[in-house]
Image (cartoon, rainbow, N blue to C red):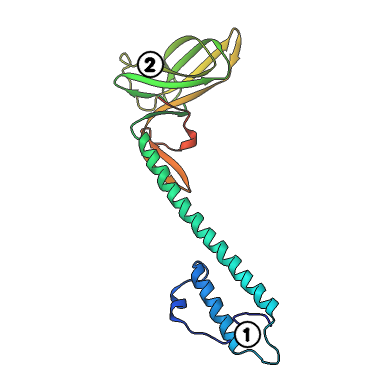
Amino acid sequence: MILSATNAPTVTDSSSTKANASTDPAAAQDRFLKLLVAQLNNQDPMNPLDNAQMTSQIAQINTVTGIQQLNQTMQSMASQFNSLQVMQGTALVGRNVLTEGSSLAVADKTGKGGFELGSAATNVKVEVTTAGGQVVDTIDLGAKAAGRHTFDWDASQYTGSTEGLQFRVTAVNGSTKLDSTALNLAKVTAAGAEDGQLVLSLSNGKTINYSQIKALV
């Protein structure tokens, strides 16, 4: 005889209607025990419930209950982890960060940006351009080692709008052109969580994942 809700008498319990057995381990176990007691009370004396079957079913409900409890614990831990991430992210608010991108941040008549070199360069040149690609100034930075660098641009002589200014980096080693990665500089304005990930809002209007930060400056 297999224990199930279909072959056992109906047991009415007000507490079970309030608890969702699919998410509440205690409610699921309580309902199982009530069904078991009801079946034992109403079993056929000539065909009693097999001890092995009863032991197996008890083991199954204990396994299900354990899994439900584990799921609830993991959900609680994930929620706490998200809260902790946001708290840690608030420490970055007001800090400047570098992320991939070629937008030039201009404040107090000074433009700031960065770049990353895969290998040492004998000469690095930064061109400041409008959003349409027109070159408005060129910065010669000379030789640079491999790695991450920042630069400043004096915008005091520039009379156009600084909104939407971009930059591009050209790096060479002798006559060989090198790969480089342009880096935006922006200030973190807010921190939050999205899909379990720490996300940061930047002063340039972008929203990024924490993993996209290349450096704090």
Image-based side of 185 in relation to 178, left or right: left
Name the residue beneath numbered marker 2: 153
Q: Position of residue 92 (x, y in %)?
A: 37, 34
Residue occupying image coordinates x 44% and y 47%: 82
Residue at the extreme left: 108
CB atoms of marks 2 and 1 within 8 Å: no
Which amino acid is tagged 2? Trp
Task: Please tell me in which quadrant of the rendered image residue 37 appears.
Answer: bottom right
Q: Is residue 68 above or below residue 122?
A: below
Image-based side of 10 in relation to 105, left or right: right
* Nearest to the observer: residue 28 or residue 175: 28
Residue occupying image coordinates x 68% and y 87%: 48
Q: Is residue 189 visible?
A: no
Q: Of the two numbered discs 2 and 1 on the same chain, state the one appearing first in sequence.
A: 1
* Nearest to the observer: residue 24 or residue 171: 24
Which amino acid is tagged 1? Asn
Residue occupying image coordinates x 51% and y 21%: 116
Name the residue beneath numbered marker 1: 7
Neighbour tally class for label 2: few under 14, some 14-19, many 20 plus, Cα within 10 Å? some
